[in-house]
Every structure is written in structure tokens, then in C-alpha cells.
Image (cartoon, rainbow, N blue to C red):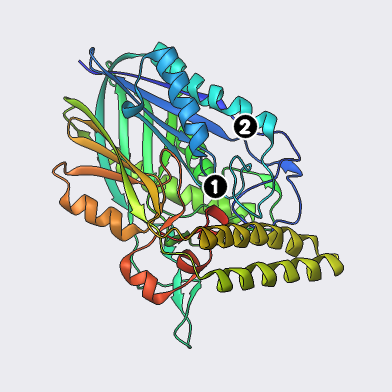
């Protein structure tokens, strides 16, 4: 018989942390609008355990992932292969990793974070009891493809109603032996950017609204955990909006999740299987030394101009770009061309249901391809899992250009995959 346990731990950062996700933030956080949480679901078949964890953060640095794995293994015996760490990708949470131009991470907070995440898993382990699972799907997207073609043919961040999205909300309902629901895992794919770059209040964005609405609707201590999908090219329907708009979108998603939960049908929960693999994605070659030197000079000049104009937001962005350009220059001087980026794939199967976790901002087309080819009919494909290398666009996106291909990697790394 399958056993399950759920737990939640508060990971709200202190005020005055830098928030991550937008390079143009005017200041550190000034307040907390709603708490950030890490939630864990642990499942056991009596022989092995797996942990599925969702948290209200932009992403996890790979060093933090390794620290969490070590603590979870020491405290619970759950191995790295059986641990899935998914972040919601909220753009109103703290900086916890080395993303350029987005403020320094709060070191005291970062030092405590791995133990808090591992504590959620440990508590969930201590609450194991017999459960059954139901799986349901309902249609009702709150996102839109964001790769909009301009009249001149170039690509911009905007709205592309004809572009690919996943319109579905997937729900895994966890019921106790007496039939009462004790937990919901809900999964959708859309960037949590309802609150834009001007927001300086800590928030889980729409996933937090949805989780709270579901927990209120079900009552009795039910825990609702969000798992973010492959939303590399999907934004929420509203970007840079108000908290009221965030509330409306989150409640709309909760309504769809409620339908999915009501439609959910029993699923087989055996066997439990796990697999984790790291593949090496090739990086594009660096430019010539001369071209790289020009990049350094251009960004240093832009930084000087921003500082002379007392434009601290622009200066902060350019400091990050100087750092990026200097890294490119060093790579160009090294003469190395055979460069790769490790990319992790994590699979957890519980009977009829499978979770596939990918460590990047993956375009939705990849998720759809994996779902179509999966031998497990009920497969949820997640981005932002066990770390994040940056954007993983489709082949055609490279020829189209745009932010995800031409710009975003400069915040994450040195070269594009």
C-alpha cells in the first residue's frame, strides 16, 4: 500500500533583500505582501521513498540543490535520484543565486535555505500514512505565448495568441484512507510575472493565490502544492499588473484546478520508479578576441555613462553586462570551442503517473513532445527543476531571435546553448 505525507515550511526572506527575475528593479524589497513557502510530498511503497517539492522561488542555484540533496539523504534516507525540487519561478521572490544585474543574494538567507527545504521533506516523511491518488485534467489556461513578431520581422516579448501553450491544468489529488482529501498537486505552465519589475513587495505571484484559494475551498488542513511547467515561452496573461489582477488570475486558475480535482479518477500507485540523467548541451562558440574586446569596451562605456547620469538602475544592469562581457573575453582568449553545459533530467514514476523534471527555462514544445512520446499516459513535464541553466529554446527560435535566445543567457551564464 502506498503511503504519503505532506508538509509546508515558511521561506519568506527578510525585508531589504534584492528580488530576482527583473534586472530593472528600482530597489530591494520594501515589504512582504504574502508569504513564500516550500511544500513537500513524500511517497513510500514500504521499500523506497520519493519526494516531490514545490517552492515559491525564482530558481535554485546548483550549489543549493546539492546541499539540499545531502541534507535530505542524511535526514530521511531519500537519495538524490528520488528528490524532485521544483521552483514556481515567481519574479517577486528573493535573489538566491548568481543572476547578473539582479542584486546580490542575502547570504544569511541563502545559508538557511537548504535546511528549510530539507526540513519540509523531513516533516513530510514523519507524516506518512496510507493514501490513494486521483488524477484529473481540466482546460483553462491563464498564460499566453509571449514571442510576438514585430512588423519588421524581429521577435519581442509580447503576446502571440497563435503560439504554443499548454491550456491544461493537471491535478494529482491525495486522499487519506478514509477518503478525505489531504493534498493537491496542481501543475500549469505560465511565467509568474503578473507583478512586474516595479513591484518591491515579496510575493508568490499567481501560484500563491491559487494555492491559498484551493486550501480554503477544501479546508480541513488540505495542502495545495504548485509545480511549474515548461513556460520558457509563456507568460501569464497579465504582465506588470496589480495585486488585484494577480488575485483574479490566481483565483481563475484555482477554479480550473477545482474542476480537475472533481473530475479526477483513481490511478494505480505502483510501482515507484526513479531515474536521473545529466546530459551535456553544447554551447555556441565565443566570438573572436577582437569582437569580445569590443563588447567589454561598449559595456564599460555604457556603465560610465549610467554612473555619470546617476541612473542606478541602468548602472546595475551594466555592471552585470560588464561582468558578462569580461567572461566572454576570457573564453575567447582561451581558444576553447568544445564547451558544454550540464542539463539534468529527473523522472519519478508513481504507478500510472510520471513527473519529468528539466533543469531550465524550457520552451513548451519540448514538454508537449515528451508527453506525446511518454509510455506513461499521465505525464507532467516540469521546468525549473533541480536547478536552472537558463533558457532552452526550440531550434526554430534561434533563427527567429528574441530575448530568450539573444539576451537572457547573459544574466545566467557566459555563452548560449
Which residue: 54% across, 26% down? 114
Question: Which quarter of the rendering shows the N terminus?
Answer: top left
State whether residue 392 appears in this view.
yes
Indicate which disc, 1 or 2, sits on the residue closer to the N terminus. 1
Question: Which quarter of the rendering shows the C terminus?
Answer: bottom left
Vertical side of 290 occupied by 124: above or below = above
- Residue count near mark 1 (Cα–Cα under 10 Å), binned few <14, some 14–19, many ≥20: many
Which residue: 48% across, 82% down? 150
State whether residue 264 appears in this view.
no
Q: Position of residue 146 (x, y in %)?
A: 45, 67
Q: Which mark is residue 90?
A: 1
Whole-number angstrom distance, CA of label 1 to CA of label 2 = 17 Å
- Residue count near mark 2 (Cα–Cα under 10 Å), binned few <14, some 14–19, many ≥20: some
Vertical side of 143 occupied by 403: above or below = below
Which residue: 53% across, 43% down? 209
The residue at the far bottom in this view is 152
Which residue: 50% across, 19% down? 119
Q: Position of residue 234 (x, y in %)?
A: 43, 60
> Can you tell which quarter of the image residue 282 is in?
bottom left
**Of residues 47 and 377, the one drawn nearer to the viewer in this rendering:** 47
Vertical side of 133 occupied by 194: above or below = below
Secondary structure found at label 2 = helix
Q: Are marks 1 and 2 in contact (CB under 8 Å)?
A: no
Secondary structure found at label 1 = loop
Q: Which mark is residue 110?
A: 2
**Of residues 357 and 30, the one drawn nearer to the viewer in this rendering:** 357
Q: Position of residue 105 (x, y in %)?
A: 66, 40
**Of residues 7 and 83, the one drawn nearer to the viewer in this rendering:** 83
Q: Is residue 196 left or right of residue 167?
A: right
Amino acid at each position: 500500500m502506498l503511503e504519503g505525507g505532506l508538509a509546508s515550511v515558511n521561506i519568506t526572506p527578510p525585508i531589504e533583500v534584492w528580488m530576482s527575475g527583473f534586472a530593472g528593479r528600482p530597489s530591494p524589497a520594501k515589504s512582504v505582501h504574502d508569504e513564500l513557502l516550500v511544500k513537500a510530498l513524500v511517497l513510500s511503497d514500504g521499500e523506497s521513498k520519493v519526494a516531490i517539492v514545490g517552492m515559491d522561488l525564482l530558481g535554485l542555484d546548483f550549489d543549493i540543490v546539492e546541499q539540499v540533496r545531502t541534507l535530505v539523504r542524511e535526514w530521511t534516507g531519500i537519495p538524490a535520484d528520488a528528490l524532485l525540487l521544483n521552483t514556481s519561478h515567481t519574479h517577486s521572490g528573493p535573489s538566491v543565486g548568481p543572476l547578473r544585474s539582479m542584486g546580490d543574494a542575502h547570504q544569511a538567507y541563502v545559508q538557511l535555505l537548504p535546511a528549510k527545504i530539507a526540513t519540509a521533506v523531513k516533516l513530510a516523511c514523519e507524516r506518512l500514512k496510507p493514501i490513494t491518488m486521483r488524477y484529473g485534467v481540466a482546460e483553462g489556461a491563464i498564460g499566453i505565448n509571449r514571442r510576438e513578431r514585430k512588423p519588421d520581422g524581429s521577435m519581442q516579448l509580447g503576446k502571440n495568441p497563435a503560439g504554443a501553450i499548454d491550456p491544461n491544468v493537471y491535478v494529482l489529488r491525495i486522499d487519506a484512507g478514509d477518503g478525505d482529501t489531504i493534498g493537491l498537486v496542481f501543475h500549469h505552465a505560465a511565467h509568474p510575472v503578473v507583478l512586474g519589475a516595479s513591484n518591491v513587495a515579496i510575493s508568490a505571484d499567481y501560484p500563491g493565490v491559487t494555492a491559498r484559494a484551493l486550501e480554503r475551498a477544501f479546508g480541513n488542513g488540505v495542502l495545495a502544492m504548485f509545480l511549474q511547467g515548461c513556460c520558457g515561452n509563456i507568460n501569464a496573461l497579465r504582465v506588470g499588473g496589480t495585486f488585484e489582477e494577480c488575485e483574479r488570475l490566481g483565483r481563475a486558475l484555482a477554479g480550473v484546478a477545482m474542476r480537475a480535482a472533481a473530475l479526477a479518477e483513481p490511478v494505480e500507485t505502483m510501482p515507484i520508479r526513479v531515474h536521473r540523467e545529466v546530459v551535456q548541451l553544447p554551447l555556441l562558440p565565443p566570438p573572436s578576441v577582437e569582437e569580445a574586446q569590443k563588447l567589454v569596451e561598449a559595456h564599460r562605456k555604457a556603465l560610465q555613462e549610467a554612473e555619470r547620469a546617476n541612473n542606478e538602475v541602468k548602472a546595475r544592469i551594466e555592471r552585470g553586462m560588464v561582468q558578462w562581457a569580461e567572461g566572454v573575453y576570457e573564453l575567447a582568449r582561451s581558444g576553447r570551442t568544445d564547451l558544454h553545459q550540464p542539463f539534468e533530467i529527473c523522472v519519478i514514476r508513481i504507478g500510472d503517473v510520471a513527473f519529468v523534471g528539466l533543469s531550465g527555462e524550457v520552451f513548451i514544445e519540448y514538454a508537449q513532445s515528451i508527453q506525446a512520446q511518454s509510455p506513461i499516459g499521465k505525464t507532467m513535464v516540469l521546468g525549473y527543476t533541480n536547478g536552472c541553466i537558463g533558457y532552452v529554446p526550440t531550434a526554430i527560435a534561434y533563427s527567429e531571435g528574441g530575448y530568450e535566445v539573444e539576451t537572457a543567457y547573459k544574466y545566467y551564464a557566459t555563452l548560449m546553448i
